[in-house]
Every structure is written in C-alpha cells, then in structure tokens.
Amino acid sequence: MTVAVRARGFDVARVRADFPILRRSVRGRPLVYLDNAATTQKPQVVIDALTRYYTEINANVHRGVHELSEVASEAYEGARLKIASFINAPDGRSIVFTRNATESINLVAHAFGRSRVGAGDEVLISAMEHHSNIVPWQLLCEERGARLRVAPINDRGELLLDQFEALLNDRTRLVSIAHMSNALGTINPVEDIVRLAHARGIPVLLDGSQAAYHMPVDVQALDCDFYVATGHKLYGPTGIGFLYGKADLLESLPPFMGGGDMISSVTFEKSTWNTLPHKFEAGTPDISGAIVLGVAIDYIQSVGLTEIAAHEQELLAYGTDALTSVRGLRLIGTARRKASILSFVLDGVHPHDIGTIVDREGVAVRTGHHCAQPVMDRFGVPATARASLAMYNTREEIDTLVRALERVRAVFG
Amino acid sequence: MSDLTDLYQEVILDHNRRPRNFRVLEDATHQAEGYNPLCGDRLNLFLKLDGDVIADVGFQGSGCAISKASASLMTDSVKGSAIADARALFDRFHRMVTTPPDVEVEDLGKLSALAGVREFPVRVKCASLAWHTLKAALEHADKATTE
C-alpha cells in the first residue's frame, strides 16, 4: 500500500494508541470501527476522567459550601466554558447542558416553539434531517396548528438553496437544519442559510450533531441563533449534550423544565427563574458527563480539529475511490461538500446482509435507515449500509472494509 | 466463515433470488402487513382460506435475504395445510430459531435451512417476520369466523 500525502503533523498511529478499545478484537479479528456517526470511541483520558471524578470529586453542584461541592461546581462550570470556547460562543451564559442534541432541539421546540409559533405559522427544515430534527417540530406544529415545511434536496444529496429561499416567508418562525447530514455526509451551506433567513428576520437553529466533531465551528461567525450538539460523538460520554443560544434570545424565552437549580425563588404563589444558563437546567445535571465532555474537548483540541478534518477528508477521498471499485456498489450521498460518511447500497444485496457479513470480518458499519427515513424514501432505498469515519481511522481499515464487501459479493454473486 | 455459510445456505440464497409465491392474491380472503421498524423490512401477506384450510398464499415486500427467503419458504410450507397445522408449525419454527446454537433442534425439512440464524441473534427477527405476519392474518381469520 502506498502512503501518499498524509495530513501534515497528524500521526494516526499515535492517535490510535490513545483509544484502548481499538486494541480489542471482534469475532477473532482486529476491530475496524466504522460506525462513528452513531457514536465515537473514547480516548483513555476521557475514561480516566470519569473514574477520577467519582474517585476524587463527586458532589452536587451549586448547592453546598463544602469543599467537594465547590470543586465539583468549578469543574462543571469550567466544562461549560470549554464548550463555549470550542464553538467560539461569547460566554458560558449561552451554553445550556442537556442530555443530547435531541433534548437540545426539544428544549427549543418547547421554550421557543410554544412562545413564538402560533396557528398558521411555519417551521422550515430540510429533506435530509435526522428524526430528531423532524419529530419535535411535528409535535409542535400539531399542537399549535402550525405547518412544517421541508426544503428539498437534489440527487447528490445537496440542499436546493433557491427552493429553500422560496420557502421562507412572513409566516416562517424558525429554520432548523442539519449543519451536516448523518445519512449522506452533506455539509450544508449554513452561512447562506443563516444569511437568507436573517434577511427576513427569521432565527436559525443548526443541528451540529455530525459537524461538531469533524470541523471547527464558530457560532459567532455563523451568526446562528441556536446550535446543538451531543457529547458522545465528540469522543465524550453518552448522556450529555449542549445547546448554544444567543443570550438575549435565551433570556427572552420561558423555561423548558421546572425544578431545582432553574429557579431563583419559589413560593406556592409564584416562582422566579434563575439567570442564564441555569434557567434551562432543572434538577441535578449530569455533572460527571459535563466535566468529562470538557476533557474530551481538550483532547480534540490537543489533536486539532483542522488536522482531524484534513485527515478525514483524505480518508473520505480514498474510501470513495475504494468503495466505488466494488462491483454493483452505489454511493448514496455524493455532495460536493461532504465529510466522513460513506453511505451505500449493493446491487442485489440488502444492507442488513452486508452488515452481518462484514461484521464477521470485524468491521462495524451501520445498516438501516439511520433515523432518517425520509432520506431513504428520497433515494428510493429501504436502507443503506454506512461507513462513517473518525480521527483514528486508517486507509488499511478502508481496505479491510472493501475486502469484506468482496466477501459479500462472493456469497451473493 | 463457517457460521456465515450456515446462515447463507444455498437454499436461502435461492429463495432470496427467486422467492416462491411472490405475488398479490387478487382473491385473498385475509391479509396482513408485517413491518420491522428497526430495519425497514416490509411484508404484505395474502391468504385465501377455504374453511380451515390455507388454500393459497402469496407475499410481496422488501427485506433482507433472510426475511425474504423465510417468507418464501413459509408460503411453500403452509400452502394447502390446515390453519391449526400452520399455527403448530409456527411454534416449531419459532422454537428452532430461538434455541441456542449448541442445542439440537427438530428437523423441519426445508425450513431447517433457517436454523443458522441461531448464531446471529439480531437476525432472528428477520427470519420470524413472515411468521408473525401469518399469525396476524390468521388472528384476523379467527375474528372473522367467530363473528
């Protein structure tokens, strides 16, 4: 195998050494983990930080005056600042911890949706959304008598920007769109989306679940009003995610859930809300999750998102060539701007059979509709197989996938 | 590789390529739709009952090789049989695909080609979809006959 241009300053072997799970075998073969769009593996520093938190720090936050509570609160708020800095948010007030991106979107659908969207109003999404960016809006629209509009995509899986623009109107209350598609890999022209929506005074939510671990994100440069992401795809633990919102916008919204920590005073007659971001964080949060997510972000930054993106782009190009050499393979999602996702179908073979056979070679890919059934319908397939890349993947792993697909061909002819 | 050849036996591949009874029954008396939301497998089953006998059976749909072959094999084995026998066969089939791989199972003739799914627990649902759909169609039949 030839080693041509590698991303400069990026040593994939060193990165791999940080991820203990990559040393294990599956079905008697070295694990080839290509299901990163579902969740990424965790570096040792993240795993250690979780143990360390419960070994040395564990206490509730924002409550006690005792030493441990102070340390825990400081670490928890420190993690919030790390996230703010990671996406270039102006301050910690605009970062709300949630369970995941889905909860972040639901938070906006409740707090923003139920106060700003009324009968006859519209919410605009795209045809490539994950179910998490469809269903909360459907629930909202049904409740409010509003209308969910869907901007179409072309055969490459790219948003049709002119049709998107044509759908913006004086009833549009919110645009909610994936920064990057989980099923197709498409990177949306989010700068144009925000510009076009803002020209009409419409706020924009960007779903960064897929984008945030593949490319640097600057919410102030994007000028989006909300940005959501999930920790477990950022090489952090499951159960923690966040919402970025412009502070004045968040300030103007009613709370999402009621409970402890989100109030400043409570009487049986009336309660008043805590300041940002605590107004949106009812109850004891996932303290360890937040702190460990901060460690995961430190790790990503120590490797460098620009370097990671370059490595993954090179791998995507290599993988695109390698996969299209497999007889009868068709890529679903060939956007000119895309990252890290190779969704495909094989003539005469159902994706589930692909998944089972390549699994026997130690290769983990996702098969199914990827929580994006409308995307499958758009491309006229019931499901796809999807290989998705992360910072620790290699060309050799792509080669293993291709060999496993040849085995699929051998079984099915 | 041996467990893979257990799963994708020639019988299965053949029924996947050329599914038997793969047609809509225009004169169906009962039908049911089977759907596995996890993988999107979809199956429409058509039955033509004559008294308590399954006089004809057909299916349409899309799915993986296992679910398609299982549907095809099922239609072959229940066509012409009494409803009670088809139900009993469902139970025996279900026992076969859910018994641990190292335990011996009853020989169900051609249907035994699907015994290999025991080594692939996540694929048991694929093999059972057609049978569950048959059961649903027959329950409907029960309702129809008791009314």
Image (cartoon, coloured by chain):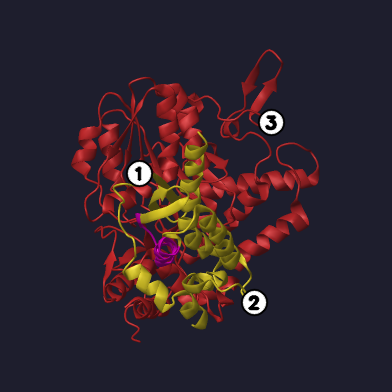
Q: Chain of mark 3?
A: A
**Residue B102 numbered tag:** 2
Q: Is residue B104 magenta?
A: no
Residue A226 in view, yes or no: yes
Q: Which of label 1 and label 3 is nearer to you? A: 3
Residue A202 figure quarter: top left
Subunit that carries the residue with mark 2: B
| Chain identifier of the red chain | A
Label tally: 3
Q: Nearer the viewer, residue B116 or B46?
A: B46
Please state if B121 lies on the left or on the right of B31 as rendered.
right
Quadrant containing the N terminus of chain A in the rendered view: bottom left
Amino acid under disc 1: Leu
Identify which residue, A396 or A312, lies in the foreground: A396
Chain part drawn in magenta: B59-77
- State the residue at coordinates (25%, 31%): A168
Letter of the chain shown yellow in the rendering: B
C-alpha gap between disc 2 and disc 3: 54 Å
Question: Can you identify the residue that label 3 sits on?
Answer: A260
| Image vertical order of residue A34 relative to residue A211, above or below | below
User: What crowding class fits label 1: few (fewer than 14 Cα within 10 Å), some (14-19), or many (20 or more)?
Assistant: some
Q: Secondary structure at mark 3?
A: loop
* Mark 2 neighbour density, 10 Å: few (under 14) some (14–19) many (20 or more): few
Marker disc for residue A222: 1
Amino acid at dot 2: Asp
Q: Do dots 1 and 3 share one subunit?
A: yes
Q: Is residue A351 left or right of residue A30?
A: left
In this view of the protein, which residue sits in the foreground, B88 or A251? B88
Nearest the camera: A239 or A224? A239
